[in-house]
Amino acid sequence: MDPGDPTGDPATGERRCTGQDPLLLLQALQTLWSTRERQQLQEEAWRGFAALDDPLAGLLDMLESCRGRRGEGPSLETWISRQLQCWLQAQPRPSPAQHSLRLKQLQARAIRVLTESPPSLVAPLTSIFQLQDADRSCLLVHVHRLHQEGRFREAVMLGTTLKLQPELDVEKMSVPLLLQDKVALVERYVAGFPDLQRRLLALMDSWCQPGFDIKDVARQYPEVTSLSLEKLSPKVLSRQVLRLQERYGVAPALCPNAAMWQRLAALRHLCHKRFVEKSLSQENWADHVRGLVGQSPWLQEQLSQLLVSHGDPVTAARCAMGLSLPEERLPAAVAVELRQLSLQGRAAEADSRLEVKDVKDRYYQLPIPRENIHLLASWEDLTRYEGALLQPHQVVGIDLEWTPVFVAGGRPRPSLLQVAVEGRVFLLDVLALSQPPTGQGAQAFSRLVAQLLSDPSITKLGYGMVGDLQNLGASCPALAHVEKQILGGVDLLLVHRQMRVTNMPTSGTDRAKGLRGLSLLVQQVLGTALDKTQQLSNWDRRPLCEEQLIYAAADAYCLLEVHQALCREPARFHLSEDLAGSRRPRHTERPGAQKPPGLQKASASAAPRQVPVAAVAEGAAPQVPARAFRVVCDNMLQGLARSLRCLGVDARMLGNGDDHRRAAEVARQEGRIILTSGQPFHKLRAQVGAGRCLSVDCSLKAQQQAKAVLKHFNVRVTHADIFSRCQACNCDQYLKVSRDMMKQLMWLSSHQEGPRSSGDKTTLSQEVQEPGPAPEAAPGGCTYDRPCRWLQAADLRAETPDMLTNGTRLQLAGVPVGVLRTPGLRHFYCCTRCGKVVWDGSHLDRVATHFRDVLESAPSPCEPSPAPSPASSPF
């Protein structure tokens, strides 16, 4: 800028351009903005920018002239700023020295504009004027002012955009947002600053300290005390802390309080296993409990309370004695019983009486002698039995055992690999064979496992085999991605999903209650369940006890017997008769390949779908119809649940206050797959087994999550599935209501005239019994209608015009009056469970477009439409 130029002020950077006047450009853009001609608007803006002598100063002129006139809705000023940002990027780069000097002259003025602008202008102004390099003192003053005014979110966003975090107090900036459950915003604030991340974790962990009351903190911020603080309870907050600890790679010692809450959750789980399910032996239970409680006085008190809640004081005292809990940590009644036991010297007797005396014939019994169970712990052992393990054309059962992990940051490490062949079981000691990684034993072990899995002549049976082998590959680098090398694998988990057990005796049904996974499959096929009392034992301890060896052998050998039973009687379980082929090598089915004749016949008939065992070979999961796919979504994935319901999937969701373990209960009781995310995944998967729990990426949007889930489980979705379920309550039963009938129901409901007269009832009865005009004929002469019946007079209560006989009240208030006048709209649909009313609209096409890459094919003209398209609510 020429100092003698009367059009500019070199001291302030303010300038009146000798080219086009910025205010005239603003006026022209305002006119086009009101007409919403976006293409013409952009062209005019870019021409105007080019005509300005100084576009940066011109932008500030326009923004300053608009102060005090900003209303609601999209901002023209923000749009202009972003367009200038794009325009500058498309221009040749100016001389760095001249550009830097000009920016310094304008930055102070830009900061003044920014302090009086809405948050949407922060990003473009920061980019255009490079405010992150400007005088930080003015910016810090503005951030502190926003914070004092209670505009906490704006203060944090501005500090993040301008990279001011190191000069701001992380606790002061984060606390108000944490109280408002804006954890994601705080995570972005500390991203890239390890020191701030550690300070944030220390702050959040201090809130998890036993006895801490978050309300004391909330009182310091009256602006946010009205918000719910349930998500900041130590139990819930500790999960967030542990998630961030793992994400930031922080040492567990920095979060001791969150770790204690996690250990308490593990104690609750172990007590449930021991005293309710009775699926954990006293020895294994005590072993895990000692490791979790340690010398923590608080955990000792919590354990004492758990023992009392699961039994009488005598039982609690016996357990306390076995665990050597301090007497001063016990409730008074338990302490009295403990002293009596000590005086009487009944500790040994107490331990023996605690053991669950199971009758042997209740559980699956290994049909081979003990001497046919071989523990292989060296390369010499592998060499001796290599021929038996790799014998061609045999069927083998494969399983894996590892010690459960109950604390954050831990990953299960495979300890034992079981391989069962006809008449024998080989237990490969993974811990001994894989150490050292370059030793003779590790090389022989990796080579043998790779040969076994890649030999197509050997049929490999497993239950959730891919998950087991992924864990094995993570522990043994030489076997990384070994699950992708499987040839001739049959995952009985996939077969189990397709089975239908309709002729199980009543006694067998009673015994199957509470069972899940492989134990349930063995119960359904062989009649006796697996004894799982050793499942959660310490598999890293050497030597393994005799009970562990028998359990491990039975876990693998039962796969052979289940497979043989399915091959003998496939029809009993509604599987294909062609099961002999399951002993032959498997090959992944190519997309578009013709289905086996038996499968085609089952699909075309009304009989239950039959799926051959060969069709569920590892790597070729069978297609599952959307309406037969059943899931339960954790409370973090409620949007995913609604998206899946939109596509016809039977999706239950946990409420905001439900514990994550509720998902496992629902999954076991109703045969559903768990969809969860983050820290709860490992605990839930341990409760339902591999293949029955999926970790979903929370960074994806709900629609993207739905696509990933459908592809993972190979779910077949057709146009007829869209809106076949109510997105609000998951019901799949609708009633069709004519438009005239809807008018009458809405009128009766709004006038509240009490019970209808006999004349009204006659009119109403006639209305519902006459469904109105038939739907228009689709091309080809086929009717295009939704598969649900018309509302009948018997479906409504006579005294209440808007209530169904099942007690469901129709949500008529959600129907805009203007919808009744929509041309071509002949009828509505109401959900029989929650009463939500929906109608045909453009939403069906939008959803079909969103999910076009997972829909099987476009609907034919004669294909019936699905249930209603809820135009009344956004997706």
Image (cartoon, rainbow, N blue to C red):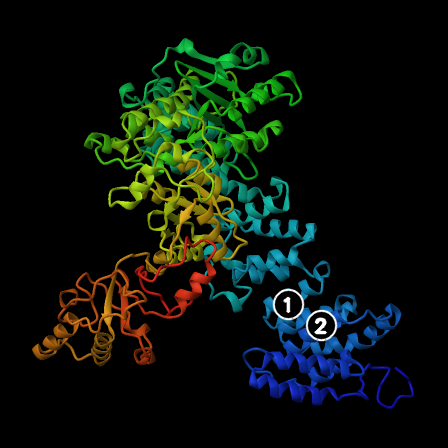
Crowd rating for badge 2 (residues with CA inside 10 Å; few <14, some 14–19, many 20+) = some
The residue shown at (53%, 32%) is 483
| Res 186 seen here | yes
Above or below for 814 versus 202 = below
Q: For residue 480, which quarter of the picture? A: top right
Q: Amino acid at mark 1?
A: Ala
Measured as percent of width and height from the top left, residue 149 is found at 61, 73
655 relative to 477, above or below: below
Q: Amino acid at mark 2?
A: Gln
Q: Where does label 2 land, which residue?
A: 85
Q: Residue at x 16, y 71 (%)?
A: 768
Relative to 286, is 175 above or below? below
Extreme left residue here?
Answer: 758
Question: Which dot marks residue 155?
Answer: 1
Specify which label sits upstream in the sequence, 1 or 2. 2
Q: Secondary structure at mark 2?
A: helix
The span from disc 1 to disc 2 (Cα, nearest Å) is 23 Å
Q: Quadrant of residue 481?
A: top right
Depth check, front residue: 191 or 870: 870
- x%, y% of residue 640? 44, 55
